Amino acid sequence: MNKKPILMVLALMINVVLLVNGCVMPWAHSKSLYLDTASDGLGGILVVLEDENEAYGQRIDSEGNIRWGDGIKLNTIQCWHSPQVTGDGSGGAFIIWCEAEEKDGNYSNFVTYMQKVTPDGEILWGQGGKPVPGSELPFIVPDGYGGAIIIQMWRSRIQLRRIDSEGNLMWGEKGVTVCTTRSTTGGDPVALADGTGGAIIAWEDDRAGGPRNDIYAQRVNSEGEIIWQEDGIPVSVPCYGQNILRIVSDGSDGAIVAWKYNNRDPSENHVHAQRLSPDGEALWQEDGVQVNTVPSTNFYPHTFGMASDGAGGAIIAWPPSRSGDGLTSEEETLLGLRAQRVDSEGKLQWPEEARLFINVNVSGRSGSRGGMLGTSVVADSSGGAIVIGVFQSTGPLPRAQKLSPDGELLWKIGGVQLFPDPQAKSYEDLQVMSDGSGGALVVAEAGRKFRYDEKIYAQRIDTEGGLLWKDEVQVYP
């Protein structure tokens, strides 16, 4: 790739074409991208990514228009940890990333930076951003009051820092340490705003020792004070362990946490969920409610999702087992997804699990997790949800389906196809968020050489299943 003038780099890297069936952001490179997205709060999408140690940002508004020109370059030296983004609620963005100096393949002098960008793409905290204390791996969530909460992880420690709209540290230079026993072999924590300026965070914890990971959670208030017991409350501590966390608000300053509940026999794995009150009380049964009636072996980090039902409960979707699930051989060609609703009291609401995408007539790649690569769920603002699944095949297979509050499929059988690239060999890193109007914003990576030669696709889908970004507009060149 030609990297001589920076304008040429940005033109190649952050250029977007609005196609007949969605918005596509092509990058001229050969390696995988690392991206993060967030709603801009106005029906559009904020996108940040790292490509070959360079970090960039872009905004797409509610009409599918590119708002930040050729994009914004964020870092000044090597981007060591890919950027993370959250919205300020008014179309702007808070972005955080980690830089490091590289010599002979070794990295040193790690520094975390943050940047605020206006809805029109103006950077407010100077070229290269403001440094943040600590060099830990960061991600970021909104605080609900025009600022943001930064979550940093290093080995077994989790630390939180709150910034206001001007980038001032509200919880001091040291921040708040919520845990010193995080599992270093597990996935990342999950966190959300608690509705009062603080945050609720859940993580995989290995304080019990042995092969298992337990689930713990903590709440920090708007002043940076620990609300629940020191080092967190136990959410689930069974005899074997669990992983792959999801979290949503319960609408009452508490949270619902879901996870994969592992058994010694992998064929007996389930999805469990627990509701936590603002005081840290577990409101559902011990170790959570078992959501799926038939065990599943087909769990991977991106293959189950959850959204609030708007009434203190949640709608959860997951992939079924590869066999023994009552499917015909034809249906097993693509297993599809299952979904269930749990109400505010922890009771399953649908007598039978909803079955999505099982009649899509495609073939999965051999060894491709039964054809399933990703699952996301987003609330539709009417007590139901929009479920998006990414299926591995030789054709374009990210699809969306809408579920009513009663578990009825509301869109056509097989769902709505989202993206147009017939040459894509894989769709990775599915990211979905509400558009604030009952629809969804969807972003995914499409690779023409199976994780290489990737493009970033974005689409907005309305509450009736219509694709809203359809105008054929070429922005560059």
Image (spheres, rainbow, N blue to C red):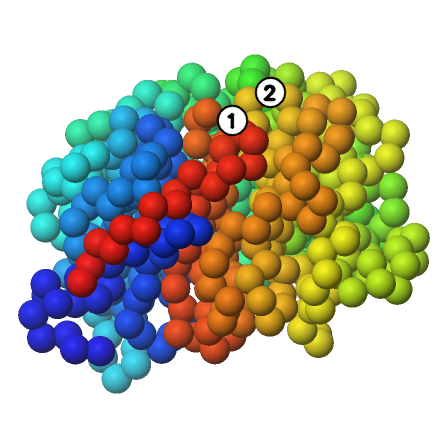
- Picture residue at 52% right of the left edge, 45% below the top: 189
Residue drawn at point x = 16 percent, y = 49 percent: 69
Q: Amino acid at mark 1?
A: Gly
Which mark identifies residue 438? 1
Q: Nearer the viewer, residue 49 or 353?
A: 353
**Element at label 1:** loop
Pick whichever, 159 or 36, lies toward us: 36
The quadrant where residue 250 appears: top right
Q: Is residue 68 left or right of residue 412?
A: left
The amino acid on which the numbered mark 2 sits, given as a three-letter code, is Ser
Rendered residue at 22%/78% (across/down):
1
Q: Position of residue 226 (x, y in %)?
A: 47, 26
- Looking at the image, the residue that sits furthest to the bottom is 104
First along the sequence among labels 2 and 1: 2
Query: Looking at the image, is 316 positioned above or below residue 146?
Result: below
Question: In the depicted view, which residue is nearer to us: 4 or 258?
Answer: 4
- Asked whether disc 2 touches disc 1, contact meaning CB atoms under 8 Å apart, the reply is yes
Quarter that holds the C terminus = bottom left
The residue where tag 2 is placed is 382
36 lies left or right of 235: left
The answer to whether 225 is drawn above or below residue 159 in the figure is above
Q: Distance between the Cα atoms at labels 2 and 1? A: 7 Å
Q: Position of residue 145 (x, y in %)?
A: 32, 21
